[in-house]
Image (tube, rainbow, N blue to C red):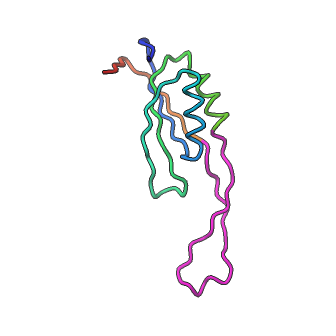
Amino acid sequence: MPDPDIDLLVLIVVSLSQSKKLEANLNRQHFYFTTIDSASSLFHEPTVCLLLGLKHERLDTLKTLVRKYCQPYRKFIPVEMRSMRELGSLPVMESQEGGATLYALPIEEFNQI
């Protein structure tokens, strides 16, 4: 059950591939959240958004967990070709994926119905 003295709304945007480990460890530390699929065509890697209500005293613990389980990593992605004739050798480009973006917003009132 969430703490009744919640004073922060936290949004965490994280890659889908790293979200499961983060979610499991958030549960172990008694963080309660809602997961929203926020996949878009802007990024190669699908993402999710976690919404949490918490006391500001727990923010450092949350940041530590996010840093531990959401490290950015490099990935090589094949470049898409325009025609089949260009398939001589498939060029790749390096991409940084993973990691997380965390937003913490102060709130005046939190109600869970």
Residue 90 percent location from the top left of the image: 66, 76
> For the point 55% across and 54% down, which residue is it?
45
The relative height of residue 112 versus residue 19 in the rendered view (above or below) is above
Looking at the image, the residue that sits furthest to the bottom is 85
The relative height of residue 91 versus residue 45 in the rendered view (above or below) is below
> For the point 61% across and 47% down, which residue is it?
98
Q: Nearer the viewer, residue 6 or 34?
A: 34
Q: Nearer the viewer, residue 28 or 48?
A: 28
Residue 95 percent location from the top left of the image: 64, 57
How many marks on residues? Answer: 0
Task: Examine the image and state in which quarter residue 105 appears.
Answer: top left
Looking at the image, the residue that sits furthest to the top is 5
Image quarter in which the N terminus is found = top left
Task: Examine the image and state in which quarter residue 59 appears.
Answer: top right
Task: Examine the image and state in which quarter residue 61 appears.
Answer: top right
Image quarter in which the C terminus is found = top left
Residue 76 included in the magenta stretch of the image: yes
State the extent of the magenta-drawn residues as a range. Answer: 70-99
Residue 53 percent location from the top left of the image: 44, 23
Residue 37 percent location from the top left of the image: 43, 45
> For the point 51% across and 36% down, which residue is it?
12
Q: Is residue 58 left or right of residue 110?
A: right
Q: Is residue 56 left or right of residue 110?
A: right
> For the point 46% across and 29% down, which residue is it?
33
